[in-house]
Image (cartoon, rainbow, N blue to C red):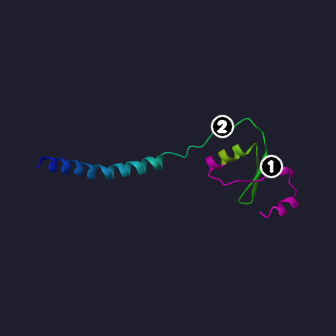
């Protein structure tokens, strides 16, 4: 009989604390911003990337990924060189 009472009291505590833990967990995830990487290797390999019709040159693919993370963008690499050196004809061939 004693073990049945102990079990019921433990179950009561669990049922009482579970919703509090769930709510706290949801609040915690809302308050914690995305943790973006902020350091890249010193390699300088320029890339041209595109997002919503906008071309942008990045020092490397790593720098582009950090920018995407921090500013919630979706730039995608279209060329392994600066955007300024891509002709209009080449852009049309990329079928963006």
**Where is residue 95 drawn, in percent x and y?**
79, 64
Which residue is pictured at 86% across the width and 54% down the height? 86
Q: Is residue 74 above or below residue 2?
A: below
Tell me the magenta residue range: 68-96
Instruction: Give whichever of discs 1 and 2 has the lower sequence position.
Output: 2
Which type of secondary structure does the marked residue at label 1 adopt? loop
Q: Is residue 55 left or right of residue 89?
A: left
What numbered label is drawn on residue 32?
A: none
Q: Is residue 39 left or right of residue 55?
A: left
What is the count of numbered marks?
Answer: 2
Give the crowd class for mark 2: few <14, some 14-19, many >=20 residues within 10 Å: few
Residue 46: within the magenta? no
Instruction: Work out which residue is located at the far top of the displayed protein and give it.
Output: 42
Residue 82: within the magenta? yes
Which residue is pictured at 17% across the width and 47% down the height? 6
Instruction: Work out which residue is located at the far left of the displayed protein and give it.
Output: 1
Residue under label 1: 80
Q: Nearer the viewer, residue 58 or 4?
A: 4
When asked about the image quadrant of residue 41, the answer is top right
Q: Is residue 49 left or right of residue 32?
A: right
**Where is residue 32 drawn, in percent x and y?**
49, 45
**Where is residue 96 drawn, in percent x and y?**
77, 63
Q: Could you give the CA–CA distance between mark 1 and mark 2, rounded to whole angstroms? A: 20 Å
Which residue is pictured at 70% across the width and 47% down the height? 64
Which type of secondary structure does the marked residue at label 2 adopt? loop
Which residue is pictured at 72% across the width and 46% down the height? 61
**Where is residue 87 drawn, in percent x and y?**
88, 56
Give the crowd class for mark 1: few <14, some 14-19, many >=20 residues within 10 Å: some
Residue under label 2: 39
Q: Is residue 82 left or right of residue 68?
A: right
């Amino acid at each position: 009989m004693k073990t049945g009472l102990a079990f019921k009291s433990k179950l009561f505590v669990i049922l009482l604390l579970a919703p509090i833990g769930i709510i706290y967990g949801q609040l915690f995830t809302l308050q914690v911003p995305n943790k973006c990487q902020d350091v890249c290797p010193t390699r300088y390999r320029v890339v041209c990337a595109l997002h919503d019709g906008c071309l942008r040159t990045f020092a490397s693919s790593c720098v582009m990924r950090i920018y995407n993370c921090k500013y919630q963008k979706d730039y995608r690499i279209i060329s392994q060189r600066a955007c300024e050196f891509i002709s209009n004809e080449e852009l049309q061939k990329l079928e963006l």
